[in-house]
Structure formats: structure tokens, C-alpha cells
Image (tube, rainbow, N blue to C red):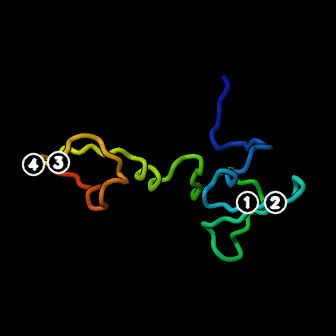
């Protein structure tokens, strides 16, 4: 019987999570070994990362849209009487019209 232990032995050669994190500033030099990684979630002297990160509680994947970006591209369904009913872009609404949720009571 073979068991798989999650979080067990790390795989060497995996890319660092910092490469996909929106909080990371990555500077590459002319050779492959020349790079600096700064973490925006850390402050002071501790913000420089000198190793490949495999797990981070502050990781925010820049390949996925942020909540703000999703709100900007969202469609809102208008169903209020007296106005045109249907879908509109959230960016076409006033800020106070974007988050109206009415109770069914």
C-alpha cells in the first residue's frame, strides 16, 4: 500500500511562489543567478527573500483577478421598477448603486 503525505518532502526545482505573487517585486540581472526578490507584505530589512518560497500565507496570485478587478468587469442585473431592466456594466453605475441588496421580507 502506498501513502501520499501532503506537505511532506518538498520537490526540488519547483518555481518560487514569489514569481506569481502580486506582492513581489522581482528584479532580474543579465545571468540566471542574478535576481532580487522583495516582498511587499513584509516590512523593513526582512522584505528581501533569498530562497525559493514553496508556501506563503500572504500569497496573492497575480494570474487571477483581484476582487476590485472582478468588480470592475462585472455585470449587474437591474430589476428595479421604473428603470430599464436587464444587465449593465458595474462601471456604468454610480458607486452607491453597485452594492444594493434588498431583503425579500
CA separation in Å, label 3 and label 4:
22 Å
Disc 2 versus disc 3: nearer the observer: 3
| Tag 1 residue | 26
Disc 3 versus disc 4: nearer the observer: 3
Q: Earlier in the sequence, mark 3 or mark 4?
A: 3
Disc 1 is placed on an element classified as strand
Whether residues under marks 3 and 1 lie with C-beta atoms below 8 angstroms apart, the answer is no
CA separation in Å, label 2 and label 1:
7 Å
- Residue located at (45% from left, 53% from top): 67
**Image-quadrant location for residue 88:** top left
Q: Earlier in the sequence, mark 4 or mark 2?
A: 2
CA separation in Å, label 1 and label 4:
52 Å
Give the vertical position of 94 relative to 70 (above or below): below
Crowding near pointer 3: few (<14 within 10 Å), some, many (20+)?
A: few
Rendered image: mark on residue 35: 2
Left or right, 71 with reference to 1 = left
Residue 50 screen position, x and y as percent: 78, 62
Q: Earlier in the sequence, mark 2 or mark 1?
A: 1
Seen as rendered, the residue at the extreme left is 105
Quadrant in which the N terminus is drawn: top right
Q: Nearer the viewer, residue 1 or 83?
A: 83
| Tag 4 residue | 105
Crowding near pointer 2: few (<14 within 10 Å), some, many (20+)?
A: few
Left or right, 53 with reference to 103 = right
Disc 1 versus disc 4: nearer the observer: 1
Q: Nearer the viewer, residue 20 or 11?
A: 20
Disc 3 is placed on an element classified as loop
Amino acid at each position: 500500500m502506498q501513502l501520499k503525505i501532503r506537505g511532506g518532502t518538498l520537490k526540488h526545482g519547483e518555481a518560487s511562489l514569489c514569481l506569481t505573487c502580486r506582492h513581489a517585486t522581482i528584479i532580474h540581472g543579465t545571468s540566471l543567478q542574478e535576481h532580487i526578490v522583495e516582498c511587499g507584505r513584509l516590512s523593513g530589512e526582512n522584505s528581501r527573500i533569498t530562497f525559493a518560497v514553496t508556501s506563503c500565507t500572504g500569497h496573492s496570485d497575480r494570474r487571477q483577478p483581484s476582487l476590485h478587478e472582478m468588480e470592475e468587469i462585472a455585470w449587474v442585473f437591474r430589476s428595479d421598477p421604473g428603470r430599464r431592466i436587464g444587465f449593465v456594466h458595474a462601471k456604468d453605475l454610480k458607486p452607491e448603486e453597485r452594492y444594493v441588496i434588498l431583503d425579500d421580507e
